[in-house]
Each structure stands twice: as C-alpha cells, then as structure tokens.
Image (cartoon, helix red, strand yellow):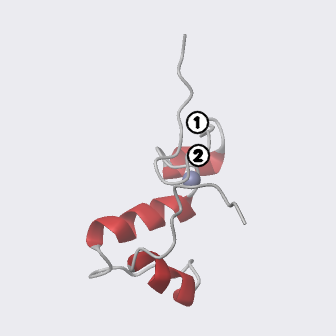
Amino acid sequence: MVRPMTCPVCGKSVSATSEEGTSAAPFCSLRCKQIDFVRWTDGRYAIVEQLDPSRLAEAMRGEIDVDSEPDE
Ligand SMILES: [Zn+2]
C-alpha cells in the first residue's frame, strides 16, 4: 500500500502527478515550499516574492500557524 504524500507545511495531500506537485515536492505547492523555506531560514535570508509581505512577516514571527486548518 502506497502511503499518500502529504505536505509538511499544511498537511494537504500532495499529488505527485501534478505539475506544481512535482516541482514543489514534497510540498503541495510552491507557496508551502516557500513557507517552509522561511521557517528554516528564520526570515534572515528570506526572499519570497510570491507571498504577501505582511503575511510573510507574520509567518516569520510565528504568528500564523499554517499547520492547523482554518478554524474561525
Ligand atoms: Zn501545503
């Protein structure tokens, strides 16, 4: 049985057959890949143009928990 691959950032199942999935593997999208990159670098070297700057700043400060599902 093949265990479905899930995105380490948002937990969404990753389709290895999608174009974005393969290029962003093991993340579900390039956006999550960038989020993970920001976490690793702790924002020190982050240049993430595809993220909204204000949201990115919050993510770097750990104020956005992207691991949890939206629950408001
Ligand atoms: Zn994801």
Q: Earlier in the sequence, mark 2 or mark 1?
A: 1
Crowding at label 1, few (<14), some or many (≥20) Cα neighbours within 10 Å? some
Q: Percent position (x, y) of residue 29?
A: 58, 55
What amino acid type is highlighted by mark number 1? Ala
Q: Residue at x 54, y 44 (%)?
A: 22
Which residue bears the numbered disc 2?
21
Q: Is 59 or 30 nearer to us in this picture?
A: 59
Query: Most extreme residue toward the front, as rendered?
Result: 72
- In the rendered structure, find residue 58 and report the number of the disc placed on it: none
Q: Mark 1 CB in 8 Å range of ligand 1? A: no
Q: Residue at x 38, y 71 (%)?
A: 38
Contact, mark 2 vs mark 1 (Cβ under 8 Å): yes
Q: Percent position (x, y) of residue 26?
A: 46, 44
What amino acid type is highlighted by mark number 2? Gly
Q: Is residue 71 above or below residue 56?
A: above
Which residue bears the numbered disc 1?
16
Query: What quarter of the picture does the N terminus occupy?
Result: top right
